[in-house]
Image: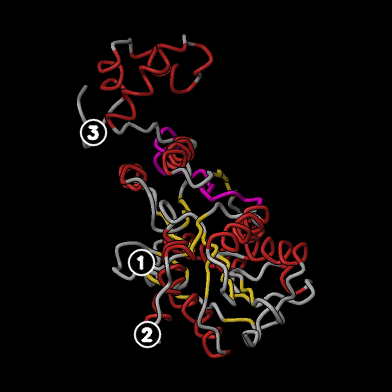
């Protein structure tokens, strides 16, 4: 089967799949009207050739759909829920509608969602982070759809982006613990393989430790999906295989909150026996007792600014390629000096 073409047409897809032009069109626009094996052949041919039926291109050349697509990690995460709400509100104020898709950190699913939103005619696209399949950005380029990277900073200048340095923010958290006197630190990290934010947060911890002549042993790091339940199990794993640490850095607030619940059930007093930090500053973080020391991520502001930047670009205005947002350390009651041994 031929590889990606510069400007693939539906006729190329039909030829590659061995079906008629009408069947290829039906398989992509009304998949329930064709046999499953035919649909799969057409979809595979379209993916191989890089064909996307761009909805805006099917409309009048001078018209826009006035929709913006966004592909976010799970929006049941409060930090992403806040961003998408702010994004939708800002777009609505300008007469645009948000088309939202979600993926569970599977980059193939993100690619499929991006293709679907482009096919729906999205005028612009909002993505999260710097980890993407090459085809994801290629789909947007071929369709002429501008995109905005959120949450992360592309300091190479290759992408328009709005976010902050996860590495520097995590470094500040670790320095805070070191300044309190902690030297034995463990980390409950998010899964780093397909998540640049999780990788950068872990790297920031290592940077801060290295600056003080310390290391982070592999046995004191667990990688788990972001959730409260995994924060509990992550702390349990660390206590079993590498006890003796006096502070735990959570890759995000749900992981840190899960660790707090595990401490409660084990009779570990925070912060007297163990200090715990999070990352995000979700609403619950300040309502806990003690309140969670964490990094404040300006999620609503990121959503608002992403909308404004895309709308400005669609209007023909120029915007800085990189916009860095503040992500301050918020010190509350879950951190204190290490216990005296």
Determine whether 306 is above or below 337 in the image. Answer: above
Camera-nearest label, 2 or 3: 2
Is any part of residue 83 visible from this angle?
no
Residue ID at (35%, 42%): 139
Please report the bounds of the magenta region as a residue range.
55-76
Residue under numbered circle 2? 213
Q: Give the mark nearer the N terminus: 2 vs 3.
A: 3
Residue holding disc 3:
4
Q: Are marks 2 and 1 in contact (CB under 8 Å)?
A: no
SS at badge 2? loop
Q: How is the rendered protein coloured?
A: secondary structure
Pointer 1 residue:
154
Tag 3's secondary structure?
loop
> How far across and down, in percent of the image, does residue 327 sit?
54, 77
Q: Position of residue 221 (x, y in %)?
A: 48, 63
Q: Nearer the viewer, residue 38 or 251?
A: 251
Where residue 318 appears, as percent x and y from the top left, is 37, 68
């Amino acid at each position: 089967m031929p590889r990606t073409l510069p400007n693939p047409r539906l006729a190329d897809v039909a030829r590659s799949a061995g079906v008629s032009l009408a069947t290829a069109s039906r398989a992509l626009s009304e998949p329930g009207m064709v046999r499953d094996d035919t649909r799969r052949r057409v979809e595979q041919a379209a993916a191989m050739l890089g064909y996307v039926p761009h909805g805006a291109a099917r409309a009048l050349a001078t018209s826009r759909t006035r929709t913006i697509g966004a592909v976010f990690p799970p929006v049941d995460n409060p930090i992403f829920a806040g961003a998408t709400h702010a994004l939708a509100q800002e777009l609505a104020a300008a007469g645009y509608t948000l088309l939202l898709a979600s993926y569970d950190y599977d980059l193939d699913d993100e690619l499929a969602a991006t293709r679907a939103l482009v096919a729906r005619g999205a005028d612009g696209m909002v993505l999260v982070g710097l980890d993407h399949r090459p085809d994801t950005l290629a789909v947007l380029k071929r369709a002429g759809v501008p995109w905005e990277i959120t949450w992360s900073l592309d300091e190479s200048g290759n992408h328009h982006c709005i976010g902050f340095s996860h590495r520097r923010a995590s470094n500040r958290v670790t320095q805070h613990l070191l300044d309190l006197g902690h030297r034995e630190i463990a980390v409950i990290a998010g899964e780093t393989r397909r998540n640049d934010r999780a990788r950068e947060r872990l790297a920031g911890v290592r940077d801060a430790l290295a600056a003080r002549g310390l290391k982070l042993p592999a046995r004191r790091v667990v990688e788990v999906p972001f959730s409260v339940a995994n924060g509990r199990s992550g702390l349990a794993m660390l206590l079993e295989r590498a006890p003796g640490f006096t502070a735990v850095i959570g890759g995000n607030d749900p992981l840190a909150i899960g660790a707090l619940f595990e401490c409660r059930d084990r009779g570990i007093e925070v912060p007297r026996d163990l200090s715990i930090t999070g990352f995000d500053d979700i609403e619950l973080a300040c309502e806990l007792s003690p309140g969670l020391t964490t990094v404040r991520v300006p999620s609503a502001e990121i959503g608002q600014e992403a909308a404004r930047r895309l709308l400005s670009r669609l209007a023909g205005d120029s915007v800085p390629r990189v916009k860095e947002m503040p992500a301050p350390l918020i010190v509350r009651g879950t951190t204190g000096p290490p216990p005296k041994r």
